[in-house]
Image (cartoon, rainbow, N blue to C red):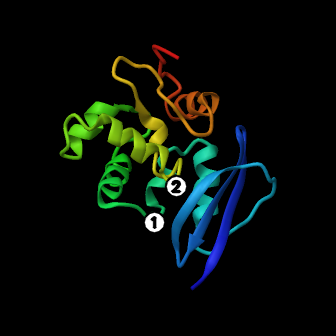
Amino acid sequence: MTRELAQVETPIGAFRAVVIDGAVRTAAFVDTKGVHRDSSGVHLALAAYFAGEVDALDAINVAPQGTQFKQSVWKLLREVPAGTTVSYGELATRVGAPGAARAVGTANATNPICLIIPCHRVIRTGGGLGGYGFGLERKRWLLAHEAPAFALVNT
């Protein structure tokens, strides 16, 4: 088993991904500074994303661990294009569980690979931001970064 770190410095803090055998297992904003390059190209994709190539994360291989429902939610999240958002209720419908918006929220809250599995693109019905484990300021920044013209209706 090969374990590597991919870490980049971003305008909103250091971001680190743990890459095991070429697939990201966990990813999060971290307090430690530094740069780590991996052989799978995750570092390059992260750097490209923060440089403005917002689709660069789509090619990253991920291997999150979770229940079948959470896996389904996380898979669908990767299909939400950069620059767009989806509501918790809409995502619940897409996963085949209408009315399970709270369960979708729980899946988002336990997403082990933030940013790459873009839980920041999920908002409340009506346009409110909802939550984000790394703070609403980061969520606002990420949404604005992905779509400069994106207007946030509610905060």
The front one of 78 and 54 is: 78
Compared across the picture, whether 148 is left or right of 134 comes to left
Which picture quadrant has residue 38?
Answer: bottom right
Q: x, y (%) of residue 117?
A: 46, 51
The residue lying at 56 percent from left, 61 percent from top is 26
Distance, label 2 to label 1, CA atoms, is: 11 Å
Question: Within 10 Å of the Cα at label 2, are there few (<14), some (14-19), or many (20+) other Cα atoms?
Answer: many
Can you name the residue that lies furthest to the bottom here? 1
The residue tagged with tag 1: helix, strand or loop?
Answer: loop
Q: Which residue is mark 1?
A: 61
Q: x, y (%) of residue 97?
A: 20, 43
Can you name the residue that lies furthest to the right here? 33
Q: Which residue is mark 2?
A: 113
Question: Within 10 Å of the Cα at label 1, are there few (<14), some (14-19), or many (20+) other Cα atoms?
Answer: some
The residue lying at 33 percent from left, 42 percent from top is 103
The residue lying at 53 percent from left, 49 percent from top is 114
Disc 1 marks a residue whose amino acid type is Asn
Compared across the picture, whether 22 is left or right of 28 comes to left
The residue tagged with tag 2: helix, strand or loop?
Answer: loop
Disc 2 marks a residue whose amino acid type is Ile
Q: x, y (%) of residue 56?
A: 51, 52
Q: x, y (%) of residue 34?
A: 81, 57
Which numbered disc covers residue 18? none
> Which callout, 2 or 1, points to the residue nearer the camera?
2
The answer to whether residue 38 is seen in the rendering is no
Which picture quadrant has residue 5?
Answer: bottom right
Q: Earlier in the sequence, mark 2 or mark 1?
A: 1
Where is 78 relative to 143, above or below? below
The residue lying at 55 percent from left, 28 percent from top is 144
The front one of 148 and 152 is: 152
Can you name the residue that lies furthest to the top here? 153
